[in-house]
Image (tube, rainbow, N blue to C red):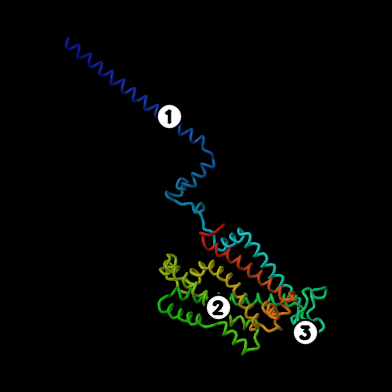
Amino acid sequence: MTKFEDEKRKLDKQELNEDRERLDKDMHEKTHSTKNDSFSKDRTDATPHDIDTHMQANPGASGEGHGAIDQESLPRSTPGWRILIQEVIHDKLALFSFIILVVITSYVFGLTLFLKQSEIVFVDLFAINEPPGDTFRLGTDYGGRDVFGQLIIGTRNSLAIGFLVTGISVGFGVVYGVVAGYFGGHIDNIMMRIVDFFMVLPFLMVIIVYVTISPDYDILSFSLIMAAFLWVGTARLIRSVAIQEKELDYINASRTLGSSHIKIIFTQLLPNLVGIIIVNATLNLAGNIGIESGLSFIGFGFPEDTPSLGTLMSYATQTQTLRHRPWIWAPAAILILVLMLCVRNVGEAMRRAGDARQRNA
């Protein structure tokens, strides 16, 4: 009886093990089938665009090696000059001001090719203080000279002085400031003491003395004497920026590779300062035109035979002209105001382009 019970217990245990193995096998096959169906569905639902995007995000799967990077898919920084253009285009007021500035400059410099300054400044005693009419578009002054011709030539002279003074002062100031900021130490100390010396000089008084003792001067010499004192502001600004730039990694890497100082300054450092140089030059242009107009207004600019916007404005110092003959000085005053506003609006847009926190585009 006992032997029979042992045989029965063994058979039951064997059947139980077989049932358990069969159940585990069924569960494994069911789970594997479900995963395959889900994977097939995901691959079927995926669009070609998704597959391409996945391949771009995982370039290692394309056979280029594990961890390879697709250079074309990496974001690229926008060049500085393009940011300036985008900011000016985005700012409608700056764009409108830039168009007006270009139109006035082109019109003035183009029309002066057909005007003779000697004929414009010729004194005609039979046409003194004539109001605007068919013969003279903007009338004449107390010497019978055509105001319209003086306005065109005077605007050209004022703009020429502004561009020359800005180009010379900004160009020299940028090189001076970059050299001082890059080398630092004793070189920077000596160069900055020279800047301090020029800053304490009353440059307006020096220009007045120069005009008084040198009656024969032209646009170039007048621009040079102005630029000799107006470069210090640009030099100090560029120096402060160069001190910060020279500590960055790309400058240290160039030094480590053995590049010369001249190559680093003109091929590495200066190209990264183009934005701030353009902004500084644009804002200085308006100030330089204003300085020339102010000196001519008080009688220490160009003489009457060399018209400028300041010389036309100086006619307003006469009471009768100021009250009864506005056609002599009002066009010059309006043109100065328009030029200053246009340059200021363009300069502000460029300044915002250099500041990412205020950028509109």
Q: Is tag 2's residue or tag 1's residue first in the polypeptide sequence?
A: 1
Q: Tell whether 187 sits left or right of 16.
A: right
Which of the labelled discs sits on residue 123, or is there none?
Answer: 3
Query: Viewer-proximal residue, 350 or 275?
Result: 350
Give the quarter of the image for residue 350.
bottom right
The numbered disc on residue 230 is 2
The correct choice, above or below, for 7 with respect to 186 in the image is above
Residue at position x 31%, y 22% from top?
A: 20
CA distance separating discs 1 and 3? 104 Å
Which label sits in the foreground, 2 or 1? 2
Is 137 displayed left or right of 289 in the figure? right
Q: Residue at x 51, y 54 (%)?
A: 75
Q: Is residue 113 visible?
A: no
Percent coordinates x, y for residue 250 in the rendering: 44, 65
Q: Secondary structure at mark 3?
A: loop
Q: Label 3: few (<14), some or many (≥20) within 10 Å?
A: some
- At label 3, the amino acid type is Val
Checking the image for residue 34, the label placed there is 1
Task: Between label 1 and label 3, give the one nearer the viewer.
Answer: 3
Q: Position of residue 142 (x, y in %)?
A: 76, 82
Q: CA distance from mark 2 to mark 1?
A: 81 Å
